[in-house]
Image: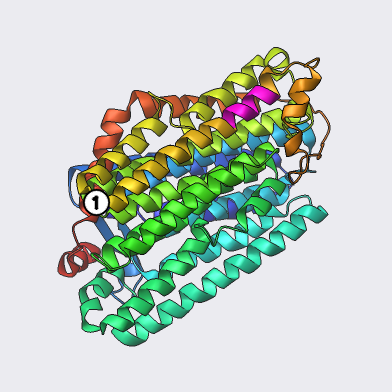
Amino acid sequence: MSALIPLLVTLPFLGAAVTLIFGRRPRLQVAVSVVTLSLVVVIASVLLATVDQGAPIAVSVGGWPIPIGIVLYVDRLAALLVLVSSIVLIAVLLFSVGQGAADGDQETPVSIFYPSYLILSAGIFTAFVAGDLFNLYVGFEILLVASYVLITLGSTESRIRAGVVYIVVSLVSSILFLSAIAVIYGALGTVNMAQIADRMAELPGEVQMVLHLLLLVAFAIKAAVFPLSFWLPDSYPTAPAPVTAVFAGLLTKVGVYAIIRTETQLFPGSDVNMLLMVIALATMIVGVLGAVAQAELKRILSFTLVSHVGYMIFGLAIATPEAYGATIYYMVHHIIVQTTLFLAVGLVERRAGSTSILRVKGLMRAAPVIAVLFFIPAVNLGGLPPFSGFIGKFALFEAAAEVGTPVMMVLIVGGIVTSLLTLYALMRAWNLAFWREEDDSAETEARIAYLGDAPAAGVETGRRVTPRIMTGATALMVSATVALTVFAGPLLEICMRAGEGLAQPVVITQLNEEAEQ
């Protein structure tokens, strides 16, 4: 099985090369992209079934010994995230195919979109299976290069401006990460995460804390953790709908994944849990308050994205196997649900010509299918029973209640308030955009007048045809959100086993033996 792991990275790169060759043949580019990501789904499924029944798998690429060679490492967490990410990437790809067929190359120039998309996928998969810090850094840089191309597609002024902010912030994060890697290598003589964990105790406590905080800040920027989340609400909404969807669903989760890996493997039982709790609470509350103050659907979702990253940091701060499992389940839930909501907003934008809840009216009557496709993931994200959002939050709150400290009780209350405000923000948006009729009274308009000065509230793009494949791809993702609830039991069990695995340190001798086989 170890021979399958490098394919998770090499297949998207090969697919990107082939799509570049077929730059003038978009149908072949689509076929190559879909086949490539479908193969990744199959491989990830096989790896997940294998590691769930046995031990994690490590492979040293090229047969080079550790720590000289590149080590790829797959456990339940890595395999599960690769599987979920590849499914999401396929659905968003199908959505983009419909958009490209309807709009031509204006929004997503196919000659560069599909190669960049596959390179982005390769960066995501590289980060998830990296067994050493430098390879994790390489995965982030692959993401950065591809995402800058994707976020500026169309070359409009707003996209170039947002792209510049995005890349500057990402470069700051990368510099911090690379500096930490250099210090760690100078102090410990390795960048392999298992070896670092084995040798970290050799360093003085002050040095460990400096390295810990340096990595935490670098990853917190990428994960959009408050107060380092200022860049996200202005960057994501300007991109084309499929790009925004995949960015919102996956890119911040790569940062969260890096925090989980380093916190559980390199710094278990550290002294920053209280700091993480404060950050988690601030991220939840500030993010959702920002969502409540918005009048544009993409910005509302961008702020809810920030706020729900707080739940994942909350679960990590609890630092128990049950909390780790609940955090993993919530990550899977949020990847799928947040992506689905952005795709649904893409449909709203095409049908109504705007994403401002001050301008859009009467979509329940005009586009009932889109209304349903938005409503289901919206109530799911808001944590309404019996959806997966409620299940994930309940699992987190239960893990916190078992710890039972006053701080945990405060975080539980903060999480409940955040969930209620999320539901309020999304249901207000649904009510105004879908339920409100064209001839609604002036009283209704007066009640929402306070949103008139919200950013981007007056943007209009014009109504466009919505191809069936775009609606179908969104419906596929909505079905996936429902599946998270229907199959919550088996999925939560896998996540709990993954959480137990995170609580057990990787044995370096075992890693060496597995990588050499």
Which residues fall within the magenta stretch? 426-432
Q: Quadrant of residue 458?
A: top right
Q: Is residue 9 visible?
A: no
Q: SS for tag 1?
A: loop
* Image-based side of 509 in relation to 400, left or right: left
What's the residue type where badge 1 is placed? Thr
Question: Where residue 93 appears, x then y in whole percent?
Answer: 59, 39
Q: Residue at x 68, y 29 (%)?
A: 347
Q: Residue at x 28, y 61 (%)?
A: 264
Q: Which residue is mark 1?
A: 405
Question: Where residue 84 appears, x then y in whole percent?
Answer: 42, 41
Q: Is 384 in front, or is 165?
A: 384
Q: Residue at x 63, y 58 (%)?
A: 231
Please rate how many residues cluster around mark 1, counting C-alpha atoms within 10 Å: few if below 14, some from 14 to 19, many from 20: few
Up-down relation of residue 481 to residue 57 (above or below): above
Q: Residue at x 47, y 80 (%)?
A: 179
Question: Where residue 143 appears, x then y in whole percent?
Answer: 55, 59
* Image-based side of 459 in relation to 305, left or right: right
Q: Is residue 1 visible?
A: yes
Q: Main secondary structure of the magenta part?
A: helix
For the view shown, which residue lies furthest in the bottom direction?
Answer: 186
For the C terminus, the quadrant is bottom left
Residue 427 shown in magenta: yes
* Image-based side of 443 in relation to 323, left or right: right
